Image (tube, helix red, strand yellow):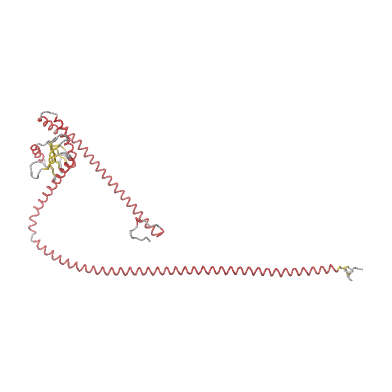
Amino acid sequence: MATQSHIVCPSCGASINIEDVLAHDIEERIKREYQERLVRDGDRIRKEAVESTRQDLEARLVAQERAVAEKDKQLKDAREKEIAYLTLERQLSEERESRELLIQRSVLEAQQTVEAKIRAAEAERLEMREREWQKKVEDQNKAVEELKRTIDDMKRKAEQGSQQFQGEVQEIAIEEYLRSTFRSDDVTEVRKGAYGADVIQVVNDGHRPNCGRIYYESKRTKTFEPRWVEKFKTDLRSAGADVGVIVTEAMPKDQPRFHQQQGVWICTFAEFKALAHILRDTLIKVSDAMAAQEHRGDKMAMLYSYLTSSEFRHHIEGIVEAFTSMREDLHRERTAMERLWKQREKQIDKVVASTTSLYGDVRGIAGREIASVPLLELPDSTAP
């Protein structure tokens, strides 16, 4: 017979353990309860997680909506401010244009009023002037015939006075140059209308006075007259001068450069300065040589012979030609330097103009972002 924890199946006679069956049932029941509990806890946890995630998302969404709303508000405020600024700027521009238009109208009206007054006064003045001129013309018509008769005389006197004035100017220049250059010499101006040359130079050496006398005569005419030489030689002999010089503006046609003609030196004013130095030095040297001689007559003969010799003339020509060449070289150098200075000045003007144009373009584009250059601005200008 089976034990108490076992029973026998009446059909098949199999022995069944009641404890095992009960334990299996209990285990199945516990598993079902555990699974059901797991399902309930999982649903609850999922619902709680979903709810937490939903709340978190809702909170974030609310925060983002608030941030977007704040930004929209700020953008709206900025736009409103910009609109207000543009509106104010437009109003100010319109007011400025209105003021300028009003000022221009006022100035134009005032200018028109002043111009009308000026035109009226000018018309009155012109009418009076016209009447005055008519009276003057009537008075002058009476003297026309007399003026016509005297025109030729006046022209002739004017030409004579002009030539005389030009000759006196050159004479004064010769005298002033001799006085300022040879301070130890006695330079005397011949009185106008007196017999003889225009200027007399008495050469005085440092240790010996009256080394010789040089006569200068000034001529400023359109043509050179050969008769001047004969007359000047007569004056030269009468005055007992050693050397004679004719300073003329118009040289003889066959001798355009300085030269000696019948014992008289003929030169232009430009050649006179060099010739004066040479003649003076020559007189001093001849005077020194003659001082060593015993007979004065022989000394005068030697002086005259040397001064009228071709050797002396060649020396003088060589020195004056060198002086003239140096003067021409100096003039050419001065002309070349002036040309270079003008060329560089034009180049500098072009650079300044280009720089000013570039500065204006940049300031027009960048405005106040570019620093102002005072040298390229007006004293009271305000850059845009």
The quarter of the displayed image where residue 119 is located: bottom left
User: What x and y, as percent, mark residue 188?
Assistant: 12, 41
Residue placed furthest toward the top = 294
Residue placed furthest toward the front = 207
Question: Could you tell me which quadrant the N terminus lies in?
Answer: bottom right
User: What x and y, as percent, mark residue 155?
Assistant: 11, 52
The correct choice, above or below, for 43 with respect to 273 in the image is below
The quarter of the displayed image where residue 245 is located: top left
The correct choice, above or below, for 183 with respect to 345 in the image is above
Question: As rendered, which of 252 and 198 lies closer to the eye?
Answer: 198
Please count the marks in the image.
0
User: What x and y, as percent, mark residue 145?
Assistant: 7, 58
Left or right: 39 in relation to 167:
right
Question: Could you tell me which quadrant the C terminus lies in?
Answer: bottom left
Question: As rendered, which of 176 and 339 lies closer to the eye?
Answer: 176
Left or right: 274 in relation to 370:
left
Left or right: 10 in relation to 52:
right
User: What x and y, as percent, mark residue 28?
Assistant: 79, 68
